[in-house]
Image (cartoon, coloured by chain):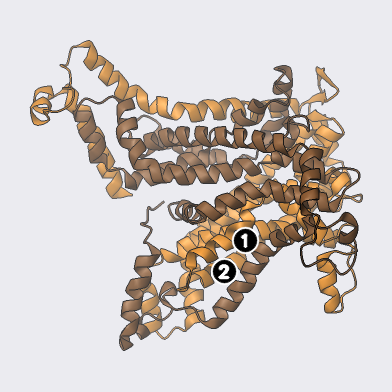
Chain colours: A orange, B brown
């Protein structure tokens, strides 16, 4: 980082200096191409203007699009969350203050959705990341056909939320479903995956786990390959066995990557939407007839586009955002604490 | 934030192999992950995991070739039946999968071109150009990744309705045509792949910034642009939340069509599986052709963070 920064500074300053201060020298040194113009000419002014403005021009598309379709809508969502906005009567928007938020906090369905989001997030993220580390460890051995193994582990990532969920719905069906059929071999009675609270939450989580474990394994694998081999050497010289090396070298070296994946998975879990929606079929936006797996994302969709209360949906969106910010702050605190203890 | 070199695993592995042959070297390198040859047990465990990864997809083919009635019976079918083409045809016509595929190609294709182009430009500026507030702006860019798409969809929906754009493809293209991840990805790549001397030399020759981008940056960024393009296409093809709100069955993308198929009132599971199969096929083909590059891209994106 430091060296490249120096190089960056060097290149920028010399590039700046070339046309302005020593045009003659530059021209003599580099005979080919268009010679840099003299200091007073309009071309020189154009050149300096180009140097100044072009970085902003290059980043402008990102910020214009993000501003128009991300930031301004985000602020408008806050504005709408303080209004009564109904889907079937969009022209009439009346100020209601914090009513939508009050309504939200006194609604059992909101707390239910919050709890479901948390539970499903936990049972989908924790096993997923732990398995991903294990898989990365295996992929890190010298393997025959290592690329093929990696691509195969990533195939679930190619499957869309919609396609994957539709397949899992069938696998989890109560009668004739593959999973219940396999379970009967070990003496388990058919489980009603769609109607039971823990069953449906487990099923929805399993779709998330299936789709993302391979992806996270590759991220861990990349980090494992960057661990210097001499760390393992000195550990084994100290008499550390394989398991101890894994615990005391691999895991600590992976810590930044683990934190990164935890943050990304948390953001994903907070927004969880497609899997429970399609898992529920016709009653999808309710998260099943008993709201067993209605997540915050689903609750927002249900309130906004099924019931038609866009003001309340906006309030749910901002509540989600606040929750994410709190989670991010906690993450940051933990990271700081870990760094201090190290 | 450190920029680490991604050591090519092949080189690492072969070096380890050489060391491994001499007796003492092998002991010394015990446990250094990559250097260890995988034992039979590793292959067994990996095979099981690989099977879990592909089994649902393989079973989709089996289910798509049966009838709805057969799929409700126990034991579930384990081998293909004779109804595959009939079901594919039904799925194709029932939710206009032809239109959906074409729409998805247009949407994902445009988003990919836009994302790669804009990310390369912005990534180059952040990696190699000096300008005021560049650090703050970069942090801001990374920070935007934290914002869930849910925060924008209510106003976007209202505005698109007002513009009369409901159900038109630009509604789902425009909000996703730039990417913070892509910008950061290209910045990290160009920091190390594009020598500052090259830019300097072009500058000394009096090249304008646009010429520098065209003749120096794009050639240097090409491998990363290809990888980012693949990743973006996969993400755009699979995007779900905003498309199902902005579009309906009159003018669907593949995911919108699959949603209609799955939430239909008289579900025919065999037809649903046929639809899921068709909607996934383009990406599976892409994985067969470019799997190595996609894997490399995900690993690169991770290591340089």
Residue at horizontal 34 percent and vertical 31 percent from the top: B213
Regarding mark 1 in the picture, which secondary structure is present there?
A: helix
- Residue extending furthest bottom? B23
Task: Using the image, determine if residue A195 lies above or below residue B149.
Answer: below
Q: Residue B44 occupies which quadrant of the picture?
A: bottom right
Where does the image place residue A140, in percent across and percent down from the top left? Answer: 48, 70
Q: Which residue is mark 2?
A: A135
Q: Residues within 10 Å of mark 2 (few under 14, many from 20)?
A: many
Residue at horizontal 48 percent and vertical 81 percent from the top: A242
Where does the image place residue A94, in percent across and percent down from the top left? Answer: 82, 19
Where does the image place residue A88, in percent across and percent down from the top left? Answer: 86, 23
Q: Residue A47 occupies which quadrant of the picture?
A: top left
Task: Using the image, determine if residue A219 lies above or below residue B248.
Answer: below
The span from disc 1 to disc 2 (Cα, nearest Å) is: 9 Å
The disc placed on residue A213 is: 1
Q: As rendered, which of B146 and B8 lies closer to the eye?
A: B8
- Left or right side of B51 for B210: left
């Amino acid at each position: 980082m430091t060296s490249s920064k120096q190089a960056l500074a060097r290149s920028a300053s010399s590039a700046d200096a070339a046309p302005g201060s020593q045009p003659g020298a530059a021209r003599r040194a580099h005979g080919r191409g268009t010679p840099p113009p003299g200091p007073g000419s309009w071309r020189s002014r154009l050149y300096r203007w180009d140097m100044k403005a072009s970085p902003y021009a290059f980043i402008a598309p990102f910020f214009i699009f993000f501003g128009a379709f991300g930031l301004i809508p985000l602020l408008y969502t806050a504005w709408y969350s303080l209004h009564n906005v109904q889907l079937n009567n969009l022209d009439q928007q009346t100020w209601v203050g914090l009513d939508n938020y009050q309504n939200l906090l006194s609604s059992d369905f909101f707390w239910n959705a919050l709890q479901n989001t948390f539970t499903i997030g936990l049972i989908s993220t924790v096993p997923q990341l732990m398995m991903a580390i294990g898989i990365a460890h295996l992929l890190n051995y010298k393997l025959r056909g290592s690329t093929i193994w990696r691509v195969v582990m990533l195939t679930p990532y190619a499957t869309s939320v919609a396609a994957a969920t539709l397949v899992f719905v069938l696998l989890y069906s109560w009668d004739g479903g593959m999973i219940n059929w396999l379970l009967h071999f070990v003496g388990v009675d058919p489980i009603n995956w769609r109607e039971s609270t823990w069953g449906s939450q487990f099923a929805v989580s399993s779709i998330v786990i299936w789709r993302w474990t391979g992806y996270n394994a590759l991220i861990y694998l990349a980090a494992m390959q960057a661990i210097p081999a001499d760390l393992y050497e000195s550990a084994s010289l100290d008499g550390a066995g394989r398991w101890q090396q894994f615990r005391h070298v691999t895991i600590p070296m992976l810590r930044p990557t683990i934190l990164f994946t935890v943050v990304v998975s948390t953001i994903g879990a907070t927004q969880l939407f497609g899997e429970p929606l399609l898992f529920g079929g016709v009653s999808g936006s309710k998260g099943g007839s008993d709201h067993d797996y209605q997540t915050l994302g689903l609750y927002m969709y249900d309130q906004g586009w099924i019931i038609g209360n866009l003001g309340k949906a906006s309030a749910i969106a901002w509540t989600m955002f606040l929750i994410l910010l709190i989670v991010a702050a906690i993450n940051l605190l933990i990271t700081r604490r870990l760094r201090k203890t190290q | 934030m450190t920029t680490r070199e991604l050591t090519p695993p092949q080189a690492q592995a072969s070096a380890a192999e050489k060391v491994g042959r001499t007796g003492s070297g092998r002991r010394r390198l015990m446990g250094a992950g990559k250097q260890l040859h995988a034992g039979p047990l590793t292959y067994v465990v990996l095979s099981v995991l690989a099977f879990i990864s592909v089994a649902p997809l393989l079973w989709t083919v089996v289910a798509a070739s049966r009838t709805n009635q057969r799929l409700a019976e126990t034991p579930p079918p384990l081998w293909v039946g004779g109804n595959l083409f009939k079901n594919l045809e039904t799925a194709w016509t029932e939710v206009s999968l032809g239109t959906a595929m074409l729409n998805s190609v247009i949407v994902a294709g445009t988003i990919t071109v836009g994302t790669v182009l804009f990310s390369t430009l912005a990534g180059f500026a952040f990696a190699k150009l000096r300008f005021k507030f560049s650090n703050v702006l970069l942090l801001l860019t990374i920070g935007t990744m934290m914002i869930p798409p849910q925060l924008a969809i209510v106003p976007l929906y209202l505005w698109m309705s007002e513009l009369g754009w409901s159900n038109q493809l630009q509604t789902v293209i425009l909000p996703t045509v730039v990417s913070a991840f892509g910008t950061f990805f290209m910045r990290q790549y160009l920091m190390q792949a594009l020598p500052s001397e090259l830019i300097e030399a072009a500058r000394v020759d009096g090249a304008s910034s646009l010429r520098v981008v065209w003749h120096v940056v794009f050639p240097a960024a090409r491998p990363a642009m290809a990888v980012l393009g693949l990743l973006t296409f996969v993400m755009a093809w699979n995007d779900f939340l905003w498309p199902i709100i902005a579009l309906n069955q009159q003018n669907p993308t593949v995911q919108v069509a699959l949603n209609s198929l799955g939430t239909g009132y008289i579900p025919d599971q065999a037809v649903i599986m046929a639809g899921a199969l068709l909607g996934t096929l383009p990406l599976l083909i892409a994985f067969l052709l470019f799997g190595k590059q996609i894997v490399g891209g995900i690993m690169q994106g991770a290591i340089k963070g």
